[in-house]
Structure formats: structure tokens, C-alpha cells
Image (cartoon, rainbow, N blue to C red):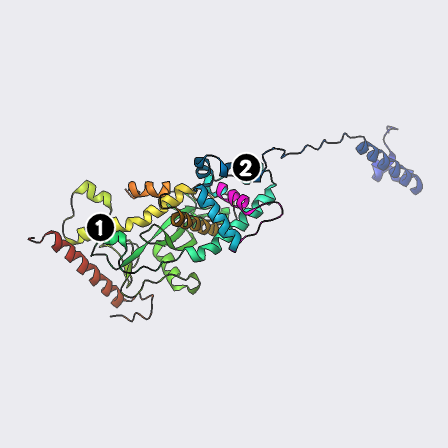
């Protein structure tokens, strides 16, 4: 046997040739040699990673005092709106931390949801650790969701909404309408074992979100987190019957516009089924023929406000078009926070570019009413009669001898 190899390495064969004292002594010497080898290894030089002279607070300040277009492109809102929102959050929901002010935390959130930036990219931009970026992202998200409890709700309006009253195509036919309801798909990330429930016909993993909006293009209700394979009517039914959702029931004698996928119930007015409905159908097939098609045409045109809201929301916040690998429980909160930002921006700046573009471009190519969620046959008949009366009056109006 090679003399350079200690006998104890061949413990099973050679140990018996050594007494126990010699064997333990040899083991101790080998451990000392191994320790010396590690001591002689070269030390790894520690190099600071985030050494940019433009730290996060300085970067935000530079954006806010710089060209107005820079703030809008980076944070997806005007400078005055950003400052106003930061003040609202500071007064009610957030506090300046030792290392980050509310303005910087809000900028981190806006950059992530507005451009779908990864945590590591944003950490390098703001010169903070990824843990700090993630923590402040969650703080702002929760603060915006709390703010949404006061912003995402119907507003009191005396009389007919000006958007309807000022347009003879809608007035007086839809004078009792308070808004529109529809569902949209927001891309989601879920573990592989749950993807089948979230995967739709186009093989895209997404969540089904049902929203209501008014004619100022502001969300009045947001219900998120359902699997894509769940149809709108089921999500809607769960929303209006679940007390915790606080669904805004339409006032007595008023209603929402819904599409044919929703039930015909008192307070929810769908179009006629089996007739042309979408605006592109009339562009390709000529003017409406009969009172049902005329009703559907104007119903579709007025209900398009909810499609415009969805279009603005998704174009402003790119995170909704490709959700990062956030926890499943966090993704609905991201949607709610973005809807809150949508409403705040709309309320603070009526001339916002995204809203202006949406208004110029067609994005869509006898029951007991004490129960606000009455889906009985009698309630459906009441709403169907209301629809018939409106449709017939429309038709008579444009075909009258006058």
C-alpha cells in the first residue's frame, strides 16, 4: 500500500492493523491538513453592487422637477396628479420610512405596474435591495386598495347623467341607466397544477374580472380573482349575492346595461338575443332593421363605456397584460390597486391622454324589490317589458310622420 495514503482510509481492511490511539492520531492530523488548505484559499473580494450617484430619492426628485412628459411616461400620470396622490396616501394610509419617503415608494409601484418591470431592475434603478423594493411595493398596493374603498363606488348624481341627457341617441330612452357591467380577462400567473382552471380558449392563463362603471369612465365596482374558465354570469351572480363584496345595487327604478351573457333581471338590462348587436355588425350589414335591432345598436353604443374603461386600464398598466410571478392571493390586489389609480387619475385630471384617446377612438370595434338580487322569472319579465317599451319608443320616434 502507498505509504502516502493513511491506513485509516482503508478503514474496513487496515484498521485492525493499527491500534486505536494511532488511528485517532492519524485522523486528527488529516483534519488539520484540510483546515490549513481552506485557510490558504484566496479570499473573495467584496464589491459594492449599487453605487450609482443617483439614488432613488434623487431620481424621483429629478423626474418631478424635470420635463412633464418624463413623469407621465415613467409613472403613467401627470406630475401634479402624482404629488397629489402621494399626499393623500401619506395623510391616510402610508408613512415615510427611515429610508424611503412615500413619493419614492409610490414611484416604485407605478414603475412596476406601468411598465411591468422586474424587482431586480427596479432595485437597480432606485439603488435598494430587492427585499426593500418588494416590501414597499406591497405597502403601496395595500394602501391603494384601502383608498379604493372610497374611490371605487357609485357617486351621487341628481337627475340624468349629462352624458346621456346631452345625446339624443340615448335620451330619453336610457335616462334611468346608471352604468354598465362587463367582465374582462387579466393575465395571471398560477402554479402548473392550477393552470387548467385559469387557461382559456387561447391557451392564455388569466383571471376573470367583473367590473361596473359609470358614464364618467370611472369604476364603481371591481370583483377580481376568478378563474378564466368561469363565465361572466357566474362571477356576477357571486358578486351580487356575497355580502362582503358590497355590490352597488342600482337604485329603485334604475338599472345597469349588461351584455347577453348576463341574466335578464330587475336592475340589469341586456340586449335582445338572436339579433345583431355589436357595432361592427351594423357597419358591415347596414342600418338597424326593426325595433329590436335599433335597441341593440344603441344599447351596444352606450355600453361601450365599460370597454373603454378596460382599454384605458390595460394600456396604462402593462402589468395587467403579463402578470409576473406574484402569489395568487396578491394578483387580485394588484388589479384592484390599478383600478384605484385609474379612478384617481380620472378624477384629478379630466384631460388625461389615455382617457382622451379612448373617447376619440372606438375601442370595442311585479317582483318584490326589497330583495335587491331578484333573479326570478317575474323580475326578468319586468325587465324584458322595460326593454320592449324602450325599443318600441325608439323605433316609433325615428319613423314618426314628424
Whether residue 35 is visible: yes
Q: Is residue 93 magenta?
A: yes
Label 2 crowd bin: few (<14), some (14–19), many (20+), radius 10 Å: some
Residue 24 at x, y = what percent? Answer: 89, 41
Callout 2: SS: helix
**Of callouts 2 and 1, the N-terminal one:** 2
Residue at 30%, 60% (x, y): give it. 158
Residue at 45%, 41% (x, y): give it. 79
Q: How many marks?
A: 2
Q: Which residue is mark 1?
A: 167
Q: Which residues are magenta?
A: 92-111
In front of the other: 235 or 45: 45
Q: Which residue is mark 2?
A: 59
Which of the numbered marks, if any, corresponds to residue 148?
Answer: none
Label 2 vs label 1: CA separation? 47 Å
Q: Residue furthest left?
A: 401
Residue 192 at x, y = what percent? Answer: 50, 46
In front of the other: 357 or 49: 357
Callout 1: SS: loop
Which of the 4 quarters of the picture holds residue 367? bottom left
Left or right: 20 in relation to 134: right
Q: Is residue 172 magenta?
A: no
Q: Residue furthest front?
A: 65
Residue at 88%, 36% (x, y): give it. 29
Amino acid at each position: 500500500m502507498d505509504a502516502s495514503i493513511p491506513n485509516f482510509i482503508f478503514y474496513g481492511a487496515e484498521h485492525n492493523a493499527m491500534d486505536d490511539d494511532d488511528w485517532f492520531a492519524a485522523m486528527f492530523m488529516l483534519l488539520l491538513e484540510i483546515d490549513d488548505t481552506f485557510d490558504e484559499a484566496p479570499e473573495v473580494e467584496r464589491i459594492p453592487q449599487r453605487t450609482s450617484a443617483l439614488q432613488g430619492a434623487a431620481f424621483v426628485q429629478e423626474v418631478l422637477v424635470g420635463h412633464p412628459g418624463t413623469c407621465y411616461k415613467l409613472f403613467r400620470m401627470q406630475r401634479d396628479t402624482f404629488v397629489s396622490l402621494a399626499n393623500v396616501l401619506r395623510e391616510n394610509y402610508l408613512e415615510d420610512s427611515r429610508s424611503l419617503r412615500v413619493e419614492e415608494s409610490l414611484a416604485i409601484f407605478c414603475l412596476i405596474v406601468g411598465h411591468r418591470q422586474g424587482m431586480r431592475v427596479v432595485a437597480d434603478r432606485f439603488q435598494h435591495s430587492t427585499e426593500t423594493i418588494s416590501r414597499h411595493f406591497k405597502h403601496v398596493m395595500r394602501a391603494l386598495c384601502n383608498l379604493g374603498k372610497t374611490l371605487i363606488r357609485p357617486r351621487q348624481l341628481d337627475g340624468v347623467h349629462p352624458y346621456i341627457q346631452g345625446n339624443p341617441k340615448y335620451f330619453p330612452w336610457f335616462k334611468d341607466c346608471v352604468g354598465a357591467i362587463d367582465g374582462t380577462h387579466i393575465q395571471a400567473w398560477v402554479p402548473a397544477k392550477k393552470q387548467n382552471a385559469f387557461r382559456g380558449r387561447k391557451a392564455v392563463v388569466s383571471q376573470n374580472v367583473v367590473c361596473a362603471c359609470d358614464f364618467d369612465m370611472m369604476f364603481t365596482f371591481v370583483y377580481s380573482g376568478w378563474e378564466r374558465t368561469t363565465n361572466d354570469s357566474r362571477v356576477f351572480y357571486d358578486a351580487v349575492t356575497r355580502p362582503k363584496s358590497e355590490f352597488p345595487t342600482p337604485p329603485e327604478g334604475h338599472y345597469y346595461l349588461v351584455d347577453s351573457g348576463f341574466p335578464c333581471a330587475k336592475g340589469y338590462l341586456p340586449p335582445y338575443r338572436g339579433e345583431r348587436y355589436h357595432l361592427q355588425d351594423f357597419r358591415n350589414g347596414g342600418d338597424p332593421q326593426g325595433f329590436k335591432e335599433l335597441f341593440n345598436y344603441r344599447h351596444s353604443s352606450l355600453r361601450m363605456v365599460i370597454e373603454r374603461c378596460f382599454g384605458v386600464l390595460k394600456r396604462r398598466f402593462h402589468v395587467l397584460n403579463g402578470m409576473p410571478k406574484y402569489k395568487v392571493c396578491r394578483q387580485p390586489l394588484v388589479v384592484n390597486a390599478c383600478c384605484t389609480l385609474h379612478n384617481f387619475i380620472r378624477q384629478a385630471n379630466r384631460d388625461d391622454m389615455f382617457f382622451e384617446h379612448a373617447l376619440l377612438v372606438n375601442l370595442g370595434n311585479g317582483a318584490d324589490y326589497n330583495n335587491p338580487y331578484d333573479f326570478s322569472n317575474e323580475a326578468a319579465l319586468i325587465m324584458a317589458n322595460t326593454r320592449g317599451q324602450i325599443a318600441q319608443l325608439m323605433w316609433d320616434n325615428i319613423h314618426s310622420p314628424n
